[in-house]
């Protein structure tokens, strides 16, 4: 058994999924699937070898898919109701209540294949048998239709009558629910493939999953892009831009955030209020690569340049309507768009000479 636990620990270290147990927390905006956890934890499964359980029918089903993921994404939180029954002998060695969550991928021949395994988690030993505990694995990715199971490490050396292994009381007697079961010493690791050894009628696995998708899912998982949520073109706030009067352009400094897919693409517009009137001073297209700062050259008309020269300077609003390049995304996703704005002070590099502020007088013909 010690060698098997060692292998499990090594597998947990080597797995692509790390794990960390955290206090219960809700993510109401995310979808949930699995048991609604209303049934009492009143059934025990105790086996000496590694054992996997997954529901195929749930009487108390949230999403109507049992343990199968209703969409692709990332399982960010799992809740399990129940505990491990402690040995009444105070001198007995303390058992290891380790378990893992796994992603099982259904195969065409009716078997399932272990696609991913989480890091190690621990079911509470004793305490309130109806307690609900939350766990947060990292990068537990699923495709639509993948099954999430509960995988314990058995425990033949920790058994006591009437149990033949570690007694996990995380099941309920529920007519209409059905749970599949498979058990084999060191036989439920990543890459292993098997058909259920037994189907337990009237048994519900008290486990619930939270599924994050799209912008709430890591880009490691299918369809996820939480690290690449588009922030829009970052126009440097409260900058002073020099108006090049001969070129009739203002150069506005801006940066494309480093996490952007492909580029920041769009149009920059300068607006200002002059003598009580809201005017558009000029617009310019841009395409800025991620983590790159550039000057966006905004062209202005001769009349606008003269107006700014008369004023000496103008505080304008710089508005960038931009989107990312979806063709550069890790997964097929839609284009992300965002509008950002800030104030820019426009100062002409040449002022009007004396007399140029006034319009030339028309000559009178005698």
Image (tube, helix red, strand yellow):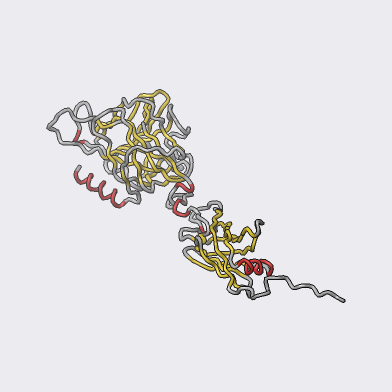
Q: Which residue is farthest right?
A: 366
Q: Closer to the camera, 309 or 336? A: 309
Residue at left offset 45%, top offset 40%: 69
Q: Which residue is farthest front?
A: 366
Expressed as whole percent of the image width and height from the top left, the position of residue 209 reads 40, 38
Judge whether residue 49 can be spotted in this image.
no
Q: Which residue is farthest left?
A: 91
| Quadrant showing the C terminus | bottom right
Residue at left offset 69%, top offset 67%: 303
User: Position of 301 compared to 98: left or right?
Assistant: right
User: Position of 81 compared to 345: left or right?
Assistant: left
Give the quarter of the image for residue 67.
top left
Give the quarter of the image for residue 28.
top left
Expressed as whole percent of the image width and height from the top left, the position of residue 2 reads 19, 44
User: Position of 27 compared to 127: left or right?
Assistant: right
* Number of numbered discs: 0
Expressed as whole percent of the image width and height from the top left, the position of residue 101 reads 34, 41
Is residue 200 depicted above or below 357 in this figure?
A: above
Judge whether residue 74 can be spotted in this image.
yes
Is residue 262 depicted above or below 353 in this figure?
A: above
Give the quarter of the image for residue 284.
bottom right
Expressed as whole percent of the image width and height from the top left, the position of residue 246 reads 63, 75
Q: Closer to the camera, 343 or 296? A: 343
Q: Closer to the camera, 291 or 105? A: 291
| Quadrant showing the N terminus | top left
């Amino acid at each position: 058994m010690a060698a098997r636990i060692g292998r499990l620990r090594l597998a947990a270290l080597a797995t692509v999924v790390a794990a960390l147990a955290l206090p219960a927390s809700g993510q109401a905006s995310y979808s949930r699937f699995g048991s609604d956890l209303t049934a009492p934890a009143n059934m025990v499964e105790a086996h000496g070898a590694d054992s996997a359980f997954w529901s195929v029918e749930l009487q108390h089903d949230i999403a109507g898919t049992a343990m199968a993921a209703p969409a692709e994404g990332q399982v960010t939180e799992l809740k399990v109701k129940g505990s491990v029954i402690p040995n009444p002998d105070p001198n007995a060695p303390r058992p290891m209540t380790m378990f893992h969550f796994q992603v099982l991928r259904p195969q065409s021949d009716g078997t399932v294949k272990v696609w991913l395994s989480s890091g190690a988690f621990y079911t509470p030993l004793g305490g309130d048998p109806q307690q609900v505990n939350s766990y947060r694995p990292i990068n537990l990715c699923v495709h639509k239709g993948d099954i999430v199971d509960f995988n314990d490490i058995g425990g033949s050396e920790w058994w006591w009558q009437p149990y033949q292994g570690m007694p996990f009381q995380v099941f309920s007697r529920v007519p209409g629910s059905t749970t599949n079961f498979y058990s084999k010493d060191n036989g439920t690791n990543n890459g292993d493939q098997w058909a259920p050894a037994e189907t337990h009628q009237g048994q519900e696995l008290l486990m619930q999953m939270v599924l994050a998708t799209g912008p709430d899912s890591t880009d490691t998982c299918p369809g996820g892009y939480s690290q690449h949520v588009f922030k829009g073109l970052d126009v440097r706030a409260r900058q002073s831009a020099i108006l090049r009067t001969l070129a009739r352009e203002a150069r506005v400094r801006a940066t494309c955030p480093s996490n952007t897919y492909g580029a920041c693409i769009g149009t920059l517009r300068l607006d200002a209020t002059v003598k009580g009137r809201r005017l558009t001073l000029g617009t310019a297209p841009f395409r800025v690569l991620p983590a790159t700062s550039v000057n966006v050259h905004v062209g202005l008309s001769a009349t606008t340049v003269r107006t700014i020269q008369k004023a000496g300077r103008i505080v304008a609003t710089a508005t960038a309507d931009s989107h990312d390049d979806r063709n550069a995304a890790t997964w097929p996703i839609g284009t992300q768009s965002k509008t950002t704005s800030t104030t820019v002070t426009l100062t002409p590099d040449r002022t009007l000479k004396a007399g140029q502020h006034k319009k030339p007088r028309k000559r009178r013909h005698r």
